[in-house]
Protein backbone atom coordinates (compact mmCIF):
# COMPACT_ATOMS: atom_id res chain seq x y z
CA UNK A 1 0.00 0.00 0.00
CA UNK A 2 2.64 2.35 0.85
CA UNK A 3 4.70 1.29 -2.13
CA UNK A 4 2.68 3.28 -4.72
CA UNK A 5 2.62 6.37 -2.63
CA UNK A 6 6.30 6.33 -2.15
CA UNK A 7 6.89 5.53 -5.86
CA UNK A 8 4.86 8.53 -6.99
CA UNK A 9 6.45 10.68 -4.45
CA UNK A 10 9.77 9.83 -5.83
CA UNK A 11 9.02 10.61 -9.48
CA UNK A 12 6.90 13.73 -9.20
CA UNK A 13 6.84 15.23 -5.80
CA UNK A 14 3.81 17.59 -5.96
CA UNK A 15 1.26 16.54 -8.77
CA UNK A 16 0.13 12.91 -8.09
CA UNK A 17 -2.49 13.75 -5.45
CA UNK A 18 -5.10 15.68 -7.51
CA UNK A 19 -5.77 13.84 -10.86
CA UNK A 20 -7.38 10.42 -10.35
CA UNK A 21 -10.01 11.59 -7.84
CA UNK A 22 -11.84 14.21 -9.96
CA UNK A 23 -13.32 12.44 -13.05
CA UNK A 24 -15.60 9.68 -11.77
CA UNK A 25 -17.47 12.03 -9.45
CA UNK A 26 -18.15 14.64 -12.16
CA UNK A 27 -21.59 13.33 -13.37
CA UNK A 28 -24.55 14.35 -11.25
CA UNK A 29 -27.52 12.15 -12.33
CA UNK A 30 -30.23 13.49 -10.08
CA UNK A 31 -32.41 16.02 -11.99
CA UNK A 32 -35.72 14.20 -11.67
CA UNK A 33 -35.93 14.54 -7.97
CA UNK A 34 -39.18 16.55 -8.03
CA UNK A 35 -41.51 14.09 -9.80
CA UNK A 36 -43.00 11.75 -7.22
CA UNK A 37 -46.65 12.98 -7.60
CA UNK A 38 -46.85 12.90 -11.41
CA UNK A 39 -48.60 9.52 -11.67
CA UNK A 40 -52.05 10.84 -10.56
CA UNK A 41 -53.20 12.57 -13.83
CA UNK A 42 -56.95 13.19 -14.25
CA UNK A 43 -58.50 10.90 -16.89
CA UNK A 44 -60.18 13.51 -19.12
CA UNK A 45 -62.52 12.26 -21.88
CA UNK A 46 -60.05 13.82 -24.27
CA UNK A 47 -61.20 15.05 -27.69
CA UNK A 48 -57.51 14.82 -28.56
CA UNK A 49 -57.73 11.06 -28.24
CA UNK A 50 -60.72 10.82 -30.55
CA UNK A 51 -58.94 13.05 -33.00
CA UNK A 52 -55.81 10.94 -32.87
CA UNK A 53 -57.90 7.83 -33.43
CA UNK A 54 -59.39 9.48 -36.53
CA UNK A 55 -62.96 9.59 -35.18
CA UNK A 56 -63.35 13.32 -35.24
CA UNK A 57 -63.28 15.77 -38.14
CA UNK A 58 -63.31 19.47 -37.41
CA UNK A 59 -62.65 21.35 -40.66
CA UNK A 60 -65.33 24.00 -40.17
CA UNK A 61 -68.01 22.20 -42.21
CA UNK A 62 -70.95 20.73 -40.30
CA UNK A 63 -71.28 16.98 -40.37
CA UNK A 64 -74.67 17.18 -42.08
CA UNK A 65 -73.15 19.31 -44.85
CA UNK A 66 -70.12 17.05 -45.22
CA UNK A 67 -72.44 14.09 -45.58
CA UNK A 68 -74.56 15.81 -48.21
CA UNK A 69 -71.53 16.93 -50.21
CA UNK A 70 -69.89 13.50 -49.97
CA UNK A 71 -73.10 11.90 -51.26
CA UNK A 72 -73.11 14.31 -54.20
CA UNK A 73 -69.45 13.62 -54.90
CA UNK A 74 -70.19 9.89 -54.84
CA UNK A 75 -72.54 10.47 -57.79
CA UNK A 76 -69.90 12.55 -59.59
CA UNK A 77 -67.41 9.75 -58.95
CA UNK A 78 -69.81 7.10 -60.28
CA UNK A 79 -70.49 9.18 -63.41
CA UNK A 80 -66.81 9.82 -63.95
CA UNK A 81 -65.88 6.18 -63.51
CA UNK A 82 -68.65 5.06 -65.88
CA UNK A 83 -67.47 7.58 -68.45
CA UNK A 84 -63.89 6.39 -67.94
CA UNK A 85 -64.92 2.81 -68.66
CA UNK A 86 -67.04 3.78 -71.66
CA UNK A 87 -64.18 5.83 -73.12
CA UNK A 88 -61.71 3.00 -72.58
CA UNK A 89 -64.16 0.55 -74.17
CA UNK A 90 -64.49 2.80 -77.23
CA UNK A 91 -60.70 3.22 -77.44
CA UNK A 92 -60.46 -0.57 -77.74
CA UNK A 93 -63.37 -1.16 -80.07
CA UNK A 94 -63.58 1.79 -82.43
CA UNK A 95 -63.21 0.99 -86.15
CA UNK A 96 -63.47 2.88 -89.42
CA UNK A 97 -61.72 5.71 -91.26
CA UNK A 98 -61.49 7.82 -88.07
CA UNK A 99 -59.78 5.02 -86.17
CA UNK A 100 -56.47 6.75 -85.55
CA UNK A 101 -57.95 10.05 -84.45
CA UNK A 102 -60.53 8.49 -82.19
CA UNK A 103 -58.31 5.77 -80.77
CA UNK A 104 -55.81 8.42 -79.66
CA UNK A 105 -58.35 10.99 -78.57
CA UNK A 106 -60.18 8.45 -76.42
CA UNK A 107 -56.89 7.42 -74.84
CA UNK A 108 -56.06 11.00 -73.82
CA UNK A 109 -59.55 11.33 -72.40
CA UNK A 110 -59.56 8.14 -70.34
CA UNK A 111 -56.12 9.01 -68.98
CA UNK A 112 -57.50 12.31 -67.76
CA UNK A 113 -60.56 10.59 -66.28
CA UNK A 114 -58.40 8.04 -64.45
CA UNK A 115 -56.67 10.87 -62.59
CA UNK A 116 -59.97 12.59 -61.92
CA UNK A 117 -61.64 9.62 -60.21
CA UNK A 118 -58.78 9.50 -57.75
CA UNK A 119 -59.13 13.17 -56.88
CA UNK A 120 -62.89 12.90 -56.42
CA UNK A 121 -62.64 9.76 -54.28
CA UNK A 122 -59.95 11.33 -52.10
CA UNK A 123 -62.06 14.46 -51.57
CA UNK A 124 -64.88 12.21 -50.32
CA UNK A 125 -62.40 10.63 -47.89
CA UNK A 126 -61.18 14.02 -46.72
CA UNK A 127 -64.79 14.90 -45.91
CA UNK A 128 -64.94 11.81 -43.71
CA UNK A 129 -66.93 9.33 -45.80
CA UNK A 130 -66.11 6.13 -47.64
CA UNK A 131 -65.71 6.42 -51.40
CA UNK A 132 -67.76 3.99 -53.49
CA UNK A 133 -65.49 1.68 -55.46
CA UNK A 134 -67.39 -1.23 -56.93
CA UNK A 135 -69.27 -1.73 -60.19
CA UNK A 136 -72.42 -2.46 -58.17
CA UNK A 137 -72.25 0.89 -56.36
CA UNK A 138 -71.26 2.78 -59.48
CA UNK A 139 -74.13 1.39 -61.52
CA UNK A 140 -76.56 2.28 -58.71
CA UNK A 141 -75.21 5.83 -58.40
CA UNK A 142 -74.45 6.87 -61.97
CA UNK A 143 -76.76 8.70 -64.34
CA UNK A 144 -74.80 7.43 -67.36
CA UNK A 145 -76.35 4.39 -69.03
CA UNK A 146 -74.24 1.37 -69.92
CA UNK A 147 -73.46 0.86 -73.59
CA UNK A 148 -74.45 -2.54 -74.89
CA UNK A 149 -72.58 -3.96 -77.86
CA UNK A 150 -70.21 -2.01 -80.09
CA UNK A 151 -71.67 1.19 -81.54
CA UNK A 152 -70.49 2.75 -84.81
CA UNK A 153 -67.75 5.36 -84.49
CA UNK A 154 -70.07 8.34 -84.81
CA UNK A 155 -72.46 6.89 -82.30
CA UNK A 156 -69.57 6.40 -79.88
CA UNK A 157 -68.76 10.08 -80.19
CA UNK A 158 -72.38 11.07 -79.57
CA UNK A 159 -72.61 8.77 -76.54
CA UNK A 160 -69.45 10.32 -75.09
CA UNK A 161 -70.73 13.86 -75.65
CA UNK A 162 -73.87 12.94 -73.79
CA UNK A 163 -71.91 11.26 -70.96
CA UNK A 164 -69.59 14.27 -70.52
CA UNK A 165 -72.64 16.53 -70.37
CA UNK A 166 -74.17 14.26 -67.76
CA UNK A 167 -71.14 14.56 -65.47
CA UNK A 168 -71.28 18.33 -65.81
CA UNK A 169 -74.94 18.36 -64.79
CA UNK A 170 -74.33 16.04 -61.84
CA UNK A 171 -71.45 18.26 -60.70
CA UNK A 172 -73.44 21.46 -61.14
CA UNK A 173 -76.33 20.03 -59.14
CA UNK A 174 -74.29 19.74 -55.94
CA UNK A 175 -72.81 23.23 -56.18
CA UNK A 176 -75.50 24.91 -54.03
CA UNK A 177 -74.69 22.58 -51.10
CA UNK A 178 -70.98 23.13 -51.62
CA UNK A 179 -71.37 26.91 -51.74
CA UNK A 180 -73.65 27.02 -48.73
CA UNK A 181 -71.07 25.13 -46.65
CA UNK A 182 -68.16 27.28 -47.91
CA UNK A 183 -66.45 24.09 -49.05
CA UNK A 184 -63.89 25.75 -51.32
CA UNK A 185 -61.75 22.67 -51.98
CA UNK A 186 -64.79 20.80 -53.33
CA UNK A 187 -65.90 23.87 -55.28
CA UNK A 188 -62.43 24.09 -56.79
CA UNK A 189 -62.42 20.40 -57.71
CA UNK A 190 -65.89 20.57 -59.24
CA UNK A 191 -65.01 23.69 -61.22
CA UNK A 192 -62.01 21.90 -62.70
CA UNK A 193 -64.06 18.83 -63.46
CA UNK A 194 -66.81 20.81 -65.17
CA UNK A 195 -64.25 22.68 -67.26
CA UNK A 196 -62.62 19.41 -68.36
CA UNK A 197 -65.95 17.79 -69.27
CA UNK A 198 -67.32 20.82 -71.07
CA UNK A 199 -64.12 21.05 -73.10
CA UNK A 200 -64.14 17.32 -73.93
CA UNK A 201 -67.81 17.53 -74.91
CA UNK A 202 -67.06 20.47 -77.20
CA UNK A 203 -64.16 18.65 -78.90
CA UNK A 204 -66.17 15.50 -79.43
CA UNK A 205 -69.20 17.46 -80.61
CA UNK A 206 -66.99 19.23 -83.17
CA UNK A 207 -66.17 15.88 -84.77
CA UNK A 208 -69.84 15.35 -85.50
CA UNK A 209 -70.42 18.71 -87.17
CA UNK A 210 -70.25 18.79 -90.95
FE1 LIG B 1 -54.48 1.42 -75.62
Image (cartoon, rainbow, N blue to C red):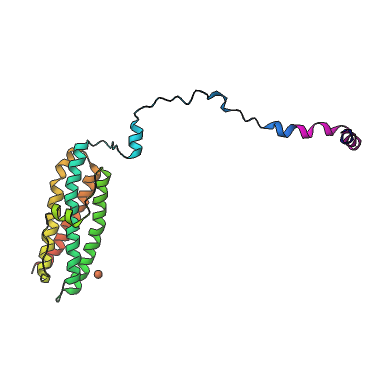
7 shown above or below 164: above
| Majority secondary structure in the magenta region | helix
Of all residues, the one furthest to the front in this rendering is: 1
Of the pair 129 and 202, the residue shown nearer to us: 129
Name the side, left or right, on which 142 lies relative to 122. left
Q: Is residue 19 magenta?
A: yes
Residue drawn at (14%, 56%) of the image: 139
Q: Position of residue 106 (x, y in %)?
A: 20, 66
Asked if 32 appears above or below 65 in the picture, the reply is above
Say which residue appears at 36% left-offset and 38% top-offset.
Answer: 52
Q: Which residues, given as a range, are shown in magenta? A: 5-21
Residue at the bottom extreme of this rendering: 97
Q: Position of residue 116 (x, y in %)?
A: 24, 55
- Which residue is found at the position 35% from the left and 33% from the top? 48
Residue 131 pos. (x, y %): 23, 49
Q: Is residue 178 visible?
A: no
- Whether 78 is drawn above or below 28: the answer is below
Determine the quadrant in which ligand 1 lies.
bottom left
In the image as oriented, which residue stretches furthest toward the left? Answer: 210
Quadrant where the N terminus sits is top right
Front-most of 207 and 39? Answer: 39
Q: Nearer the viewer, residue 176 or 90?
A: 90
In the rendered image, residue 41, in percent from the top left (x then y), is placed at 43, 25
Image-based side of 84 in relation to 48, left or right: left
Please determine whether, in this image, residue 11 is positioned above or below residue 76: above
The quadrant holding residue 40 is top left
Amino acid sequence: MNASKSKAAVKVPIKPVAKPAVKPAAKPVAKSAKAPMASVKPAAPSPEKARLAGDKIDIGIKERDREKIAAGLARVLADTYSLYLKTHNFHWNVVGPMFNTLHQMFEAQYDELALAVDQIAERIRALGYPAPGSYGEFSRLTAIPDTVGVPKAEEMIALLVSAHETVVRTSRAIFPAVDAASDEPTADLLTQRMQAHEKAAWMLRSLLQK
